[in-house]
Image (tube, helix red, strand yellow):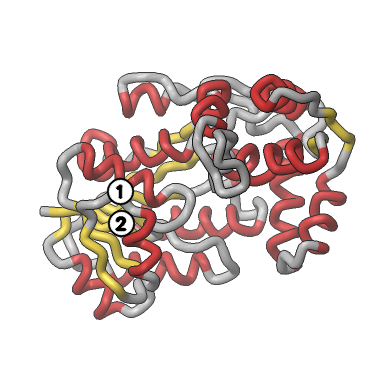
């Protein structure tokens, strides 16, 4: 029997597929964009074209699988989409592994996307389905690769909306590895697993690590969650999403996401990737902007 991966072409999905294939698990993905899936996913994954919001399409793709990785695009309808998938799979004897959000934000009054995750978690837990919930802390790939590193390269400065608070960021690669274990090992059924990096780091500490790696000074400028919302809105981000990020920055600024858990080590048998190692790997990859060796990873 195989595993079905939904949301396979985003930040985490390719790592889930890679980890499953490396474990010898037959892996199937359902995607609206099969061309992109074939370009970015490892060879060996079976790519099925279709919309997971269509029950018949989803059930055809899930036929004969033993587990489903539940992930959908960050958006206003995320909860509706995922609840529809859970309902469609209700008569299938499959394990559902849901990728949720930062654990301290999964509350009925948390930031926008996290409120949606909270709702889905409640329904999934009450559904009777065999399930595992993964709650990763903030991704290195999002905050470092896509935000801090480009800012440091382009202007030599990184905005700090978190103040003195640290953040135990995790690599999406570790999340993918943990998901592969949860999808294939029944020992984790029914659990909520809180995935963090190995330590909490502040924005000035990240800036210093980047400075050492890229070879020139990186300064830190004072910012606020509200200022970050305005920047994101000015770049064209929808209002609701910019407000969500403001809420997340406020949460992080409070220090509520500094804690470190041992759940990655319990799942994988080793600790999570450290930010220093992540940066070393990231900056060793060639990119179109600098084919000689500097790297950018989305």
Q: Please give the name of the residue rendered at 22% of the width and 44% of the height, measured from the top-left corner.
A: 21
Marks 1 and 2, how far apart in space? 7 Å
Instruction: Please name the residue shown 29% across and 73% down the image.
Output: 49
Q: Is residue 183 above or below residue 62?
A: above
Residue 129 shown left or right of residue 168 in the figure: left
Inspect this view and state whether residue 154 appears. yes
| Of the two numbered discs 1 and 2 in the rendering, the one whose residue sits closer to the viewer | 1
What residue does disc 2 label? 5
> Which quadrant of the view contains residue 40?
bottom left
Placement of 205 over or under 129, stated as above or below: above
Left or right of 178? Residue 214 is right
| Of the image marks 1 and 2, the number of the one nearer the N terminus | 2
In the picture of the structure, the residue carrying the numbered disc 1 is: 17
Q: Secondary structure at mark 1?
A: helix
Residue 85 position by quadrant: bottom left
Relative vertical location of residue 54 with respect to residue 151 in this rendering, above or below: below
Residue at the spot 80% in from the left edge and 24% down from the top edge? 217
From the viewer's side, name the closer residue of 67 and 41: 41
> Where residue 100 sits: x, y (%)?
48, 49
Q: Residues within 10 Å of mark 1 (few under 14, many from 20)?
A: many
**Residue 273 coordinates in the image, percent (x, y):** 47, 25
Give the SS element for disc 2: strand
Is there CB contact under 8 Å for labels 1 and 2? yes
Q: Is residue 202 visible?
A: no
* Residue 37 placement (x, y as % from top left): 35, 61
Instruction: Give the camera-side residue of 170 and 68.
Output: 170
């Amino acid at each position: 029997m195989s595993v079905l991966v939904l949301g396979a072409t985003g930040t985490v999905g390719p790592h889930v597929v890679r980890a499953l294939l490396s474990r010898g698990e037959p892996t199937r993905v359902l995607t609206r964009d099969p061309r992109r899936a074939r370009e970015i996913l490892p060879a060996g994954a079976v790519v099925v074209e279709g919309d997971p919001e269509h029950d018949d399409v989803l059930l055809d793709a899930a036929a004969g699988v033993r587990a489903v990785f539940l992930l959908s695009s960050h958006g206003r309808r995320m909860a509706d989409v995922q609840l529809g998938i859970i309902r469609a799979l209700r008569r299938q004897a499959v394990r559902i592994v849901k990728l949720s959000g930062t654990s301290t934000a999964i509350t009925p009054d948390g930031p926008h996307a996290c409120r949606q995750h909270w709702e889905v978690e409640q329904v999934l837990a009450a559904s009777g389905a065999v399930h595992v919930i993964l709650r990763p802390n903030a991704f290195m790939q999002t905050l470092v690769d896509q935000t801090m590193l480009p800012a440091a390269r382009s202007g030599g400065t990184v905005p700090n909306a978190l103040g003195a608070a640290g953040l135990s960021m995790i690599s999406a690669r570790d999340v993918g590895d943990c998901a592969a274990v949860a999808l294939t090992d029944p020992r984790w059924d029914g659990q909520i697993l809180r995935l963090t990096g190995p330590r909490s780091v502040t924005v000035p500490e990240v800036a210093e690590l980047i400075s050492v790696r890229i070879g020139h000074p990186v300064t830190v400028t004072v910012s606020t969650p509200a200022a970050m919302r305005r920047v994101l809105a000015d770049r064209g981000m929808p209002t609701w999403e910019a407000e969500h990020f403001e809420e997340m920055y406020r949460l992080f600024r409070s220090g509520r996401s500094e804690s470190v858990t041992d759940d990655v080590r319990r799942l994988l048998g080793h600790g999570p990737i450290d930010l220093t190692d992540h940066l070393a790997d990231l900056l060793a990859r060639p990119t179109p902007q600098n084919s000689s060796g500097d790297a950018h990873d989305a």
